[in-house]
Amino acid sequence: MFETWVFYALAAVLLLSGLLVITARNPVHGVLFLVLAFFTAAGIWLLLRAEFLAITLVIVYVGAVMVLFLFVVMMLDINLERVREGFWRNLPLALVVGGIMVAEMIYILWERIFGVGAAPRQVPASHSNTKELGRVLYTQYAYAFEIAAVVLLVAIIAAIALTLRKRKDSRSQDPSEQARAKRSERVKLVSMPAEKE
């Protein structure tokens, strides 16, 4: 019973933080709410006894990816008004996709509550979910795993390319021009008579 109440509390925080991610006016606040959502999802995975997935979510997404997102958001100097212009135009598509996701979750919960689907496989207490996850990931889903790695590589390259764009307010130095500099061009000695007190 206690685990049920903890699950409902974490689910409520997860839904609220997910809603605040897409409604936050400041992109930095949106990233921070996404960090809260990841922490809450990790707590739910701990309740499901998927410790490896929970720790991976915290270490990889919160510890690395979200910090990268935060730096990218702060470095890109995003024009918020231009980003919000397409919100109402894309709202119907977002509602359709969100409705499909809600229907899928209801279907999964319906099977769990009413026992329509197959019963979960019974495993011994010494069973390692990390070993099982690795076996399935690198055998049955190896191709999809490699595709995900390529997609992440493309995303990293795109983020680097966005930060290297030319800005009118940015200042840069030309190292070759600095190396060709001469002392006579930089320093001018002026002979002045000494003043007496």
Image (cartoon, grey):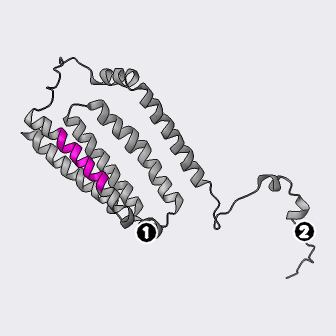
The residue shown at (38%, 55%) is 31
Quarter-of-image position of residue 193: bottom right
Residue where numbered disc 2 is placed: 189
Magenta range is 96-108
By secondary structure, the bulk of the magenta-drawn segment is best described as helix
Question: In the drawing, does residue 153 fall left or right of residue 47?
Answer: right
Callout 1: few (<14), some (14-19), or many (20+) C-alpha neighbours within 10 Å? few
The residue shown at (76%, 56%) is 174
Callout 2: few (<14), some (14-19), or many (20+) C-alpha neighbours within 10 Å? few
Residue 23 counted in the magenta span: no
Residue 102 counted in the magenta span: yes
The residue shown at (13%, 35%) is 112
Q: Position of residue 97 (x, y in %)?
A: 31, 51
Quarter-of-image position of residue 63: top left
Residue 169 circle label: none
Return the residue nearer the eye: 148 or 45: 148
Amino acid under label 2? Leu
Q: Position of residue 158 (x, y in %)?
A: 55, 48
Residue where numbered disc 1 is placed: 85
Q: Closer to the camera: disc 1 or disc 2?
A: 1
Return the residue nearer the eye: 144 or 60: 144
Q: Where is residue 190 in the image (x, y as percent from the top left)?
A: 91, 72
Give the SS element for disc 1.
loop
Cα distance in 3D space between marks 1 and 2 = 59 Å
> Where does the C terminus fall, quadrant-wise?
bottom right
